[in-house]
Image (tube, rainbow, N blue to C red):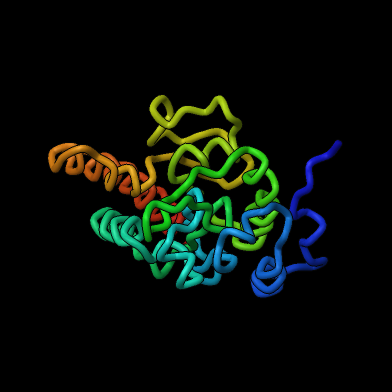
């Protein structure tokens, strides 16, 4: 039996707005019962860099916008240190609803499973087709494995340019939330330094493309 996905919900001759509006009513998996609302991607029209994470967190679920919580603020900091203007990028997630489990009064992130990722993947592929970024960056294992297969390992391939037809340049690096989960301040500094180093490669690639376009 074929898995149910969001493929049938993608509008004909779509653009970002029609995708956004259609995704708001997505019921391709049961996560719509868990999340407050669909959290679709957002960013600059014609953005040359696209960043893809796993799923919205608690703050994103409440705000209806991606990367606005603690991990988003770390991403902002890392982008700024790397010389990338977030306002000129596009940010999104593979999964568009917040999957969580209760812990007291808090809603704690729960990793989406393969069925949930597969159900949501048509939205991401449509976003890629709409934005057509020059550089695509997968933030974390879930995003990278959604696009490169479950055998992909961030620990092996992070910070490297990957062969792909998804965009002219594609890279995978750690999700900013990994910095938040680091056990101590030294580990957090190391993780942040590694993320910024990867993003500087992205910045260099964007500058090369800009010079060639002139």
Q: Nearer the viewer, residue 210 or 104?
A: 104
Q: Nearer the viewer, residue 72 or 28?
A: 28
**Residue 106 x/y as whole percent:** 38, 58
Say which residue appears at 47% left-offset and 50% top-offset: 101
**Residue 172 x/y as whole percent:** 45, 39
**Residue 85 x/y as whole percent:** 35, 65
Say which residue appears at 40% left-offset and 40% top-offset: 173
Residue 55 in the figure: left or right of residue 10: left
Q: Quadrant of the N terminus?
A: top right
Total marks in image:
0
Residue found at the very far front of the displayed protein: 104
Q: Quadrant of residue 197?
A: top left
**Residue 50 x/y as whole percent:** 50, 56
Say which residue appears at 66% left-offset and 49% top-offset: 121
Can residue 131 be seen from the camera position used here? yes
Can residue 135 be seen from the camera position used here? no
Residue 126 vertical position relative to residue 147 in the rendered view, above or below? below
Q: Nearer the viewer, residue 180 or 174?
A: 180
């Amino acid at each position: 039996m074929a898995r149910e996905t969001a493929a049938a919900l993608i509008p004909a001759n779509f653009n970002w707005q029609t995708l956004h509006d259609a995704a708001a009513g997505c019921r391709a998996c049961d996560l719509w019962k868990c999340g407050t609302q669909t959290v679709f991607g957002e960013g600059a029209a014609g953005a040359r860099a696209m960043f893809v994470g796993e799923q919205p967190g608690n703050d994103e679920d409440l705000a209806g916008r991606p990367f606005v919580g603690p991990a988003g603020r770390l991403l902002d900091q890392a982008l700024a240190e790397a010389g990338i203007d977030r306002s000129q990028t596009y940010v999104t997630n593979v999964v568009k609803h917040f999957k969580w489990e209760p812990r007291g009064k808090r809603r704690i992130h729960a990793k989406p499973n393969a069925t949930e990722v597969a159900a949501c993947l048509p939205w991401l592929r449509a976003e890629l087709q709409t934005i057509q970024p020059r550089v695509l960056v997968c933030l974390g294992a879930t995003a990278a494995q959604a696009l490169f297969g479950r055998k992909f390992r961030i620990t092996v391939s992070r910070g490297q340019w990957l062969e792909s037809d998804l965009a002219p340049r594609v890279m995978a690096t750690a999700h900013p939330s990994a910095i938040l989960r680091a056990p101590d301040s030294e580990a957090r500094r190391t993780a942040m330094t590694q993320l910024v180093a990867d993003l500087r490669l992205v910045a260099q690639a964007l500058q090369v493309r800009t010079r060639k376009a002139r």
